[in-house]
Image: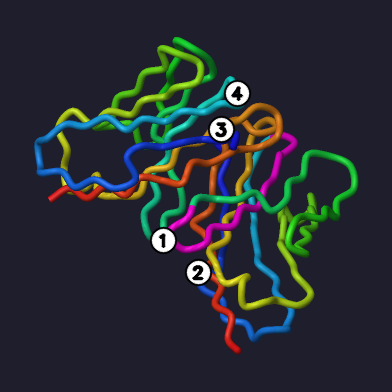
Amino acid sequence: NAGVTQTPKFRVLKTGQSMTLLCAQDMNHEYMYWYRQDPGMGLRLIHYSVGEGTTAKGEVPDGYNVSRLKKQNFLLGLESAAPSQTSVYFCASSYLSGYTFGSGTRLTVV
Amino acid sequence: AQSVTQPDIHITVSEGASLELSCNYSYGATPYLFWYVQSPGQGLQLLLKYFSGDTLVQGIKGFEAEFKRSQSSFNLRKPSVHWSDAAEYFCAVGADTGYKLSFGAGTTVTVRA
């Protein structure tokens, strides 16, 4: 089925560890996004990309890095995880008609 | 800067009763407005969207929303809720037809028998 796939679905990290979240879409969308969802705060934009090779900061970019080397993939990296980064992370892609979301990655940093 | 306010954190409604969720937005130009629904442990699914034209838009699952420019609102309604409508609902506004959306904090809907 066409859509947005996120891996992994769950992860537990120790403070200071690093990890990369992978987002892949097969709809040929130009725009891709990483959001984090926290209770009572809705979704907040971390980073986004308007095309292959481009990235930009969103509302809450600190502590995260991203790369978009291929149009279909958007990677979110945490270089040194902190407990404040415990959250559910959603990737989305869009082109003209609204977002298509992945199913999310639940990350816990202990 | 664009922003969205959903004033109700939690709403409880009886099955078969009507539902209305409030959404107020702040945006300097013509807004592109969306409602999404999120079931527990799931991603977000698009219910409906407004780009232009008729201010009353129909969506999936029997939902509709009305755009009122004078009130900067885009309220979501359903005439008769089903138990399966229990979920969290997010309103979003964007600068283009799907570019860089800003989301409200969400409204959790509980449906009682």
Distance CA(mark 4)–CA(mark 2)? 33 Å
Question: Label 2 is found on which chain of the structure?
Answer: B
Which residue is disc 3 drawn over? B100
At horizontal 71% and vertical 56% (from top left) the residue drawn is B73
Q: Secondary structure at mark 1?
A: loop
Per the rendering, the mark at residue A40 is 1
Residue contact at pointers 4 and 2, CB within 8 angstroms: no
At horizontal 78% and vertical 39% (from top left) the residue drawn is B51
**Residue B34 in magenta stretch:** yes
Other residues around mark 3 within 10 Å, as few (<14) / some (14–19) / many (≥20): many
Q: Residue furthest bottom?
A: B113
Question: Label 4 is found on which chain of the structure?
Answer: A
Which residue is disc 4 drawn over? A29
Magenta segment: B29-42
Residue contact at pointers 1 and 2, CB within 8 angstroms: yes
At horizontal 53% and vertical 58% (from top left) the residue drawn is B38
Taking the image as shown, residue B33 lies to the left or right of residue B69, namely left
Distance CA(mark 1)–CA(mark 2)? 8 Å
Colouring: rainbow
Distance CA(mark 1)–CA(mark 3)? 20 Å
